Image (spheres, grey):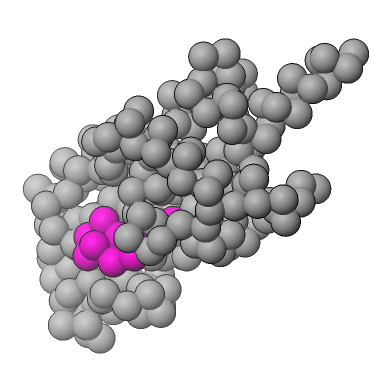
Amino acid sequence: MFNRGANEWGPEQARKIFSLLERQYPHARTRLAYSDPFQLFVAVLLSAQTTDEQVNRITEKLFAVAPTPQQMARLQPEELEPYLKGCGLYRNKSRYLVEASRKLVKDFGGKVPENFDDLLSLPGIGRKSANVILSVAFGQPALAVDTHVFRVARRLGLALGRRPEDVEAELKEILPPEKWGRAHHRLIAHGRSVCKARNPRCTGCILKAYCRWAITCQNKRGGA
């Protein structure tokens, strides 16, 4: 396990890394298509185990039928299923969407809540999804940790935690709140284009000089 006490992988290291990421991905943002907080809520819920591009294809047809929580709440899960069939776990997600929409109408006046705990009370919404909604829909300081953020942050040495919530806490310690949302999108962009789960493109990576994983691999090869 790496020792953060050396300062090298603390706030100063993070500043250098995110400065480079900002230069490389200045316009990184969500790829999900939406026009209001409810539509983002739906897209985020559907995005688990499904690509953003596929979610957008699904929601384009879905929102033509039920673009509001009131309209979604009137449906039965079985009526939603045909629209969601291209989505992973579509039967569960159909049920979550109907139940969540009914709860939004009943408990929140038909509006997506701007509170973390209230978001977590909605079916189908976990910590990552709640953070995405708070950050993207409402501009609140929140840092969602998905598989890309988890992988890239740990490889870089910015976080050492073995659970997403631990990585989230570590990143929040070394980044100011106003940078949390943008850090999320830039780490995702880097994870998709360079620091992939399999066969990461370390050669030519802008972060190679600051990456714990790359440095360790290089040292192992040098000592072989």
Using the image, determine if residue 175 lies above or below residue 150. Answer: below
Question: x, y (%) of residue 105?
Answer: 19, 79
Viewer-closest of 189 and 105:
189
Q: Report the quarter where the C terminus lies.
A: top right
Magenta extent: 132-144
Viewer-closest of 86 and 210:
210
Q: Left or right: where does residue 142 sit relative to residue 66?
A: right
- The total of numbered circles placed on residues is 0
Question: x, y (%) of residue 68?
Answer: 13, 63
Q: Left or right: where does residue 109 sit relative to residue 206?
A: left
Picture quadrant where residue 132 is located: bottom left
Q: Left or right: where does residue 69 sit relative to residue 203?
A: left
Question: x, y (%) of residue 40?
Answer: 23, 55
Q: Left or right: where does residue 63 sit relative to residue 42?
A: left
Examine the structure image and report whether residue 102 is included in the region drawn in magenta. no
Question: x, y (%) of residue 25?
Answer: 32, 32
Who's the residue at 32% across and 60% down the image? 178
Who's the residue at 61% across and 32% down the image? 211
Using the image, determine if residue 27 lies above or below residue 3. Answer: above
Picture quadrant where residue 20 is located: top left
Q: Can residue 26 be seen by looking at this rendering?
A: yes
Examine the structure image and report whether residue 136 is included in the region drawn in magenta. yes
Viewer-closest of 140 and 12:
12
